Amino acid sequence: MSLSQGRSYLAIPGPSVMPDRVLRAMHQPCPNIYEGGLIELTHSLIPDLKHLASTSGQAAIYIANGHGAWEAAVSNVLAAGDTVLVLATGRFCEGWGEMARALGVTVETLDFGNRATIDLAQVEAHLAADRSGRIKAVMAVQVDTSTSVLNDIAALRRSLDAAGHGALLMVDCIASLGCDKFLMDEWGVDLMVTACQKGLMTPPGISFVFFSDKAAAARNAMTRVSSYWDWNARINPEYFYQYFCGTAPTQHLLGLREALDMILEEELRHVWARHEAIARAVWAACDAWGKGGPLAMNIADPALRSHAVTALSIGAPNGLNLRRWTEHQAGLTLGIGLNMATDDDPNADGFFRIGHMGHVNAQMIMGTLGAIQSGMMALDIPHGKGGLEAAARVLAEATRG
């Protein structure tokens, strides 16, 4: 008998759960795109987006998913024949590098595997050896959702400085903005990309590129930038349509305004603290379950784990079976394992991910963990006792702070 009737829950690492407030804001007729409230609403988004990124730099909006933001970033600062250094800690920085390569950029990759953060000493040595300044930019991901690793961006900046290298520091915060602490200006980030469907709690469809004066100078030195991806008109629009190089994404703007209001009402530091508490509750449950069975978190060191997503292994075919059970028997959708094994690897069905980003609270995560434990029990997957109690204890302690 299935017990999945009722409101389903999406616990994947993006798209995240969309708040009812956001959905209600979007569920209205398209507004006037020539004058009036929508224009003023759009103007109001930019300073609030910059507040979330902790930057006094510029911000451009694109009608695109995160991959579109990747291409926009590359197109504005890197030309065919330029060289970029990709710091791979999972699938997504690899993907950003692949996009750069498709645009004619030469890609050098330092691959740190699927279970580790960036080796800063290796990065510093690689850049110090580049005495000619061949490398124009360094690409990194703050949180890679495939591995759930959290990279230390401030320390990466220090590595670039220690090497005496002038490369642009480009950071993907698609999975981390509004979840994990990020301070663009203080950490010396030159360019950052993000999108609306994770910590920003808005359905997929718009993305953002934030950039410093140094990145702006790199753009202005380019001999050619696609008119669609060019951020110059978007940041200084003479006409409203130039924000988007065409028709505005009306309903997404309405939803994003509501989502930003929710974040500002909660206050960003509390948003970060809430994500940390919920992540620690997930980890506590997983630690307890792992003591009596095959479940293991992908990143061993808690200090190197994202507060937005937890990647796990549980052995094949347990990962696939558990995801199917939670979805069809409990109404809970968990994330697939991504890039942890090849499709023809017999271990490929042994991974899954728990998304805990954006619009998520204590009872939502306890429901998620309860469904996972029920699934392990129903499927006879060995696991240690006390997982739910451990998670509840973390949440109880967090509320006392």
Image (spheres, rainbow, N blue to C red):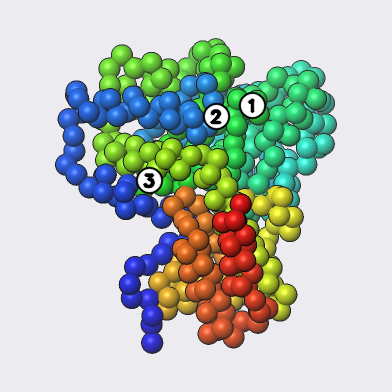
| Disc on res. 202 | 3
Q: Secondary structure at mark 1?
A: loop
State if disc 1 and disc 2 touch (CB < 8 Å): yes
* Residue type highlighted by circle 1: Glu
| Disc on res. 54 | 2
* Residue type highlighted by circle 2: Ser
First along the sequence among labels 2 and 1: 2
Q: Residue 202's quadrant in the figure?
A: top left
How packed mark 1 is, by other alpha carbons closer than 10 Å (few <14, some 14-19, many 20 or more), is: few
Q: CA distance from mark 2 to mark 1?
A: 8 Å
Is 19 positioned to the left or the right of 161 in the image? left
Q: Secondary structure at mark 2?
A: loop
Q: Which residue is mark 1?
A: 186
Q: Position of residue 3 (x, y in %)?
A: 38, 80
Q: Is residue 295 visible?
A: no
First along the sequence among labels 1 and 3: 1
Q: CA distance from mark 3 to mark 2?
A: 20 Å
Task: Examine the rendered structure and indicate whether residue 64 appears above or below residue 286.
Answer: above
Viewer-side label of 3, 2: 2
Q: Position of residue 142 (x, y in %)?
A: 62, 41
Q: Residue 340's quadrant in the figure?
A: bottom right
Q: Secondary structure at mark 3?
A: loop
- What residue lies at 68% left-to-right and 78% top-to-bottom? 384
Q: CA distance from mark 1 to mark 3?
A: 27 Å
